[in-house]
């Protein structure tokens, strides 16, 4: 192996000439007798050989300048060598690849631009929440504002849109507008739904349940939680202060906070396949809530069946 490497080095030195390298090279697998004759011919024809790696008595990997490929193929053909191109490489190869695959490049650019454009387009408006009964009125308002299918998300401000929806519909106590893919998701909460309301000089807004913060809207005060945070009963949601030029100033809280509460109720029944009955019993306790039943799990005992009904609801806090 060492002898082959030394031979390869000598062959390369034999063909090296003072020729400018263009930064692009092609590697070929060449098979035939008397490779020295091939390399000598390359010298005479002005083919720059960058590297030679012998693989045996009859074979070698030969790397030449890309611009000399035509000459190299012709020499191999005239001298009856078998030659197969392996690959192109070099510092400028990425540019060569793009040049050779201009269709791929153009296609990629078109795809990126299309994806960026399409991501900004509203394909659907979805309403949910207890205030969904007023979706027709809200949709009409959105249409009057130029917001609807095929409008662009970048043409309106989601936070301002929330305030405008509340301002134009007194039957709603809360509105949330979010972008989910190409869907404008609008959550509406009825003003008649039970809300923990604190009025007057509220120093802080406190949670009386365990749950996960679903939305926060602070007009005055400082939020102590973010969307997705888990809170416990007694945790402060919004503090009654504001920072003005590095100074803390006490203020009255004006804010909305929604906390998603998950609860499980166990119902004992004597009969099997009583999931619906267990659900009715479990939800009766929360008749004043807008409940969503997540699951009903049945546990069989010797004398009875235990049904575990898991539910969630949105607890809304308002201060101001």
Image (spheres, rainbow, N blue to C red):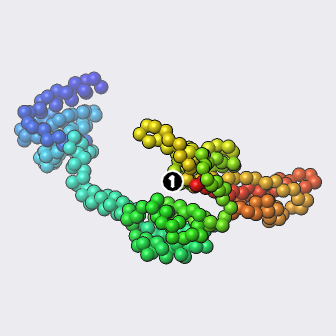
Residue 277 visible in image: yes
**Which of the two residues, 23 or 79, is positioned nearer the viewer here?**
23
Quarter where residue 58 is shown: top left
Q: Quadrant of residue 274?
A: bottom right
Residue at point 64% right, 54% down?
198
Question: Would you call the spot at circle 1 few (<14 residues within 10 Å), some (14-19), or many (20 or more)?
Answer: few
Towards the viewer: 81 or 189: 189
Q: Which residue is mark 1?
A: 219
Query: Among all residues in the image, which is located at the extreme front?
Result: 200
Q: Is residue 298 above or below residue 37?
A: below
**Residue 92's spot in the image, x, y percent?**
20, 44
Q: Position of residue 20 (x, y in %)?
A: 9, 37
Residue occupying image coordinates x 32% and y 60%: 113
Residue 175, relative to residue 139: is it above or below? above
- Apparent side of residue 204 relative to residue 167 in the rendered image (left or right): right
Q: Could you say whether the residue bearing mark 1 is in a helix, strand or loop?
A: strand
The one nearer the camera, 220 or 120, is 220
Quadrant of residue 136 within the rendered picture = bottom right
- Where 305 sits versus 88, above or below? below
Residue 318 as seen in the image, left or right of residue 51? right
């Amino acid at each position: 192996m060492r002898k082959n490497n030394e031979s390869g080095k000598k062959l390369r030195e034999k063909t090296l000439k003072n020729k400018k390298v263009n930064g692009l090279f092609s590697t070929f697998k060449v098979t035939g007798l008397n490779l020295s004759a091939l390399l000598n011919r390359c010298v005479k024809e002005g083919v720059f050989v960058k590297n030679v790696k012998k693989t045996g008595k009859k074979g070698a990997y030969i790397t030449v300048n890309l611009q000399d490929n035509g000459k190299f193929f012709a020499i191999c053909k005239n001298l009856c060598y078998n030659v197969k191109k392996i690959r192109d490489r070099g510092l400028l190869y990425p540019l060569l690849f793009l040049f050779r695959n201009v269709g791929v490049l153009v296609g990629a650019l078109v795809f990126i631009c299309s994806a960026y454009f399409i991501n900004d387009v509203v394909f659907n408006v979805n309403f949910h929440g207890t205030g969904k009964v007023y979706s027709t009125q809200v949709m009409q308002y959105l249409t009057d504002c130029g917001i609807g299918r095929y409008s662009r998300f970048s043409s309106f401000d989601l936070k301002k849109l929330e305030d405008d929806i509340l301002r134009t519909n007194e039957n709603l106590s809360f509105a949330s507008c979010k972008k989910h893919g190409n869907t404008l998701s609008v959550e509406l909460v009825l003003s008649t739904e039970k809300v923990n309301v604190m009025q007057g000089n509220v120093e802080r807004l406190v949670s009386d349940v365990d749950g996960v913060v679903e939305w926060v809207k602070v007009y005055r005060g400082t939020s102590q939680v973010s969307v997705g945070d888990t809170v416990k009963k007694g945790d402060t949601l919004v503090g009654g202060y504001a920072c003005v030029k590095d100074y803390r100033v006490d203020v009255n809280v004006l804010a909305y906070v929604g906390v998603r509460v998950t609860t499980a109720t166990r119902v004992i029944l004597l009969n099997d396949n009583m999931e619906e009955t267990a659900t009715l019993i479990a939800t009766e306790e929360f008749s004043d809530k807008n409940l969503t039943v997540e699951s009903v799990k049945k546990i069989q005992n010797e004398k009875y069946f235990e049904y575990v009904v898991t539910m969630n609801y949105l607890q809304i806090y308002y201060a101001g």
